[in-house]
Amino acid sequence: MFDMCRINRKTMQPVENDHPLSGSNYLAYARELKKIGLENGIVCNQSHAPFPVNVPAVRSYLKRAIECTAEAGGEICVIHPDNNGTAEQNAEMYAELLPFARDCGVKIATENMWNWDKEKNQSSFAACATGEDFRKHIDILNDDFLVACLDLGHAEMRGSGNGCVSMIHTLGPRLQALHIHDNDCIHDSHQIPFSMNIDFGPIVRALKEIGYNGYFTMEAGTFVQQFTADTALEGLCQLKDSARKLADMFAEA
């Protein structure tokens, strides 16, 4: 739902937007997406709200994102924390959204973020980047409708956190969603799993050890975007095969 609210990243101001999710018939559009999906055997399990949430225009669309998730049949809506906010500061935003999310039957998942250190040419600490800060963001509100979405690529970037395996064990049952993709352990590349440097074996074993029972959700958008309309099916099949490989690893762990 990133196009729900488009932002000029230089001015951080909203720009003109004719996307259906921005208009008055946004729920009808969400229903149509659900219908098309179900006709093709595809269900909506989780969604992603627009960001960055420190921009007031974006913040104003977060309830709409939750509402559209419910309309499409999703169970979880990922809403970023403010990168530079503390657990206490981010709790104010989530506390405002949680009653609405509960009424919609949609859980909010916060996500581990990163900033960038230009001098060191690597990521640096941001909200939820470590297991301890991630857990604090969730526990401070003690609400069953606020859970964790662990972005594996973010967690494995050098400099910002303490790695997937440690974070998985720290989060335990709070972990109910994943963003899965690969990178060189430096940049946020969003490539297909098993194509770069992340070692997925220990990660999958850690997920099995905590009894993770959520979805394996691919977030390899950059990989998919390199394909044309004529070759898109090839890229999606490769992504499907990598997801199946991960699922088989999990089953055998």
Image: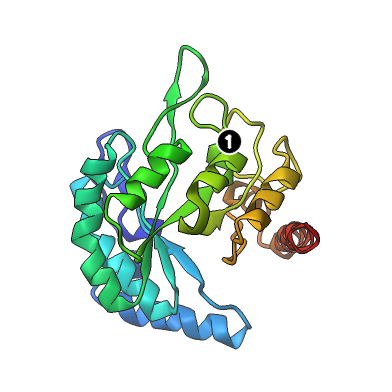
Q: The residue tagged with tag 1: helix, strand or loop? A: loop
- The picture places residue 100, in percent across and down from the top left corner, at 23, 70
Q: Which image quadrant: the N terminus?
A: bottom left
The one of 251 and 186 positioned closer to us in this rendering: 251
Give the colouring mode of the picture. Answer: rainbow
Location of residue 67 with respect to 226 vertically, above or below = below
Q: Which image quadrant: the C terminus?
A: bottom right
User: Could you tell whether 215 is left or right of 204 in the image?
Assistant: left
- The picture places residue 14, in percent across and down from the top left corner, at 24, 48
Image quarter of residue 143: bottom left
Location of residue 123 with respect to 93 vertically, above or below = above
Residue farthest toward the top in the current orientation of the protein: 119
The one of 180 and 253 positioned closer to us in this rendering: 253
Residue type pointed to by label 1: Gly
Does residue 33 appear in the picture of this structure?
Answer: yes
Does residue 54 appear in the picture of this structure?
Answer: no
Location of residue 64 with respect to 40 vertically, above or below = above
Identify the residue position indicated by label 1 in the image. Answer: 163
- The picture places residue 197, in percent across and down from the top left corner, at 72, 35
Q: Determine the residue positioned at 43% across, 67% down.
A: 76
How packed is label 1: few (under 14 Cα within 10 Å), some, or many (20 or more)?
many
Image quarter of residue 19: bottom left
- The picture places residue 103, in percent across and down from the top left corner, at 26, 77
The one of 47 and 247 positioned closer to us in this rendering: 247
User: Could you tell whether 196 is left or right of 122 in the image?
Assistant: right
User: Could you tell whether 92 is left or right of 118 in the image?
Assistant: left
The one of 229 and 40 positioned closer to us in this rendering: 40
